[in-house]
Amino acid sequence: MQKEKPMNELPVMNEQEGIVLFHPHVPARAIDEVTNVLQSRWIGQGPRVAQFEKEFSKRFAGAGSSIAVGSGTDALHLAYILAGLKAGDEVIVPVFTCTATNIPFLYMDVHVRFADVDPETLNIDVNHVRQLVSDKTKAIVCVHYGGLPCDMDELHAVAKEFNIPIIEDAAHAPGATYKGKVIGAISPFTMFSFQAIKHITTGDGGMLTLQDPTLVSKAERIRWFGIDRSNKQKGTWENDITEVGYKYQMTDIGAAMGLCSLHEFDDILGHRQKLMEGYKKGLRGAQGIKLIGADTTDRTHAAWLCTALVEANRVGFMHALRNKGIESGQVHYRNDRYSIFGGRRDDLPHMDAIEDRYMVLPLHTKMTLEQVDYICEVIKQGW
């Protein structure tokens, strides 16, 4: 294997030079749909947002409802408020996730307890979650890393025992299922992200699915300054705000994009899953590398990330791929490395063990199976 080189020597890539790690998926018809919105009366939150919520609910929320917002982070903050979290409460959260999962707790002065990863999936370790639960714990947050669902039965068993809600961060996982149940319809609160490179993009945006119908009106008020928009538009609003709200609404411009992706979602998801299967087949038996989540049979992977563990010399691995025109990276990092969360914890042995080994490979709708085969062949040549 090659001698490891500094990370900052890795060349910057673009799609003309090779296979990039991410690429947005924007349906061709979205251009016309957005143009129609721009020529209409409504470009902010209007009828397209309502339509997007309705159609999204049919697909992902089960019997629940959907609230469209300006980002996945907005949706998480909204979920945390609706779950009743208050300053001084504790929540159990994954240490390995985008910081968006946990930053809203800093807005709220809610204390995070970082749970370790499951080394087989990089999802939250249910055994560690159980060890962390205390009388101060008011919620458990889980992230379906890369699009692979967490151990939801086990997490719900803990939540039921201690009478605390589960909040799912499904930013990576639209279309994923757990034991036949669609992600978005399992827990009281589930967040989806429509950031630029997700399965569905609205430029930036998010959705919160709710299983409790009594929370819908409150969610709609909080995403718009605490104002009851429906009454205001009827001219019957009494001009009072009784709860703190935020400017978290989605626009009809974004919703028009989201609807186009939703209408071709089967093709988007199917293509990504075919690429993931190509990686599984191409790297089966390869030396020095192991795909994460390749052997699960009771859940369906949404295939947002293809993540692997390399036995040694991760930077050398990245250089070997870059030299062949293939981009790779870590994408997410353990959150306790960031000063805002108080520094590194010493009770996360699984995270410690994989910290210098995990690697994300290209996976997006602009890729072909032939490119996946090429990447696998490059990897099997060694690094």
Image (cartoon, rainbow, N blue to C red):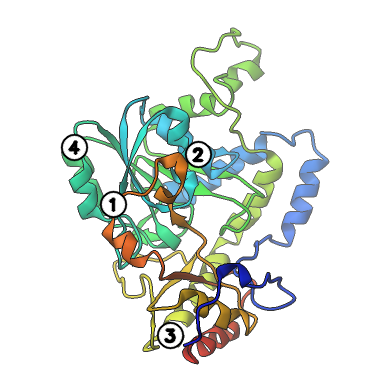
Please give the residue where the numbered disc 3 appears in the rendered image. 283
For the residues labelled 4 and 1, the Cα–Cα distance comes to 26 Å
Task: Tell me the element at label 1.
Answer: loop
Task: Tell me the element at label 2.
Answer: helix
- Residue found at x 53% / y 37%: 74
Please give the residue where the numbered disc 4 appears in the rendered image. 162
> Are circles 4 and 1 on residues that touch, CB within 8 Å?
no
Specify which label sits upstream in the sequence, 3 or 4: 4
**In the displayed structure, would residue 225 be above or below residue 329?**
above
For the residues labelled 1 and 3, the Cα–Cα distance comes to 33 Å
In front of the other: 69 or 14: 14
In the image, which disc is placed on residue 346? 1
For the residues labelled 2 and 3, the Cα–Cα distance comes to 36 Å
> Are circles 3 and 4 on residues that touch, CB within 8 Å?
no
Specify which label sits upstream in the sequence, 2 or 1: 2
Few, some or many residues within 10 Å of mark 1 (<14, 14–19, 20+):
few
Amino acid type for the residue under numbered disc 1: Asp
Q: Residue furthest left?
A: 161
Amino acid type for the residue under numbered disc 4: Phe
**Residue 373 appears at what percent x and percent y?**
54, 87
Determine whether, in the image, residue 362 is placed left or right of residue 130: right
Frontmost of labels 2 and 3 is 3
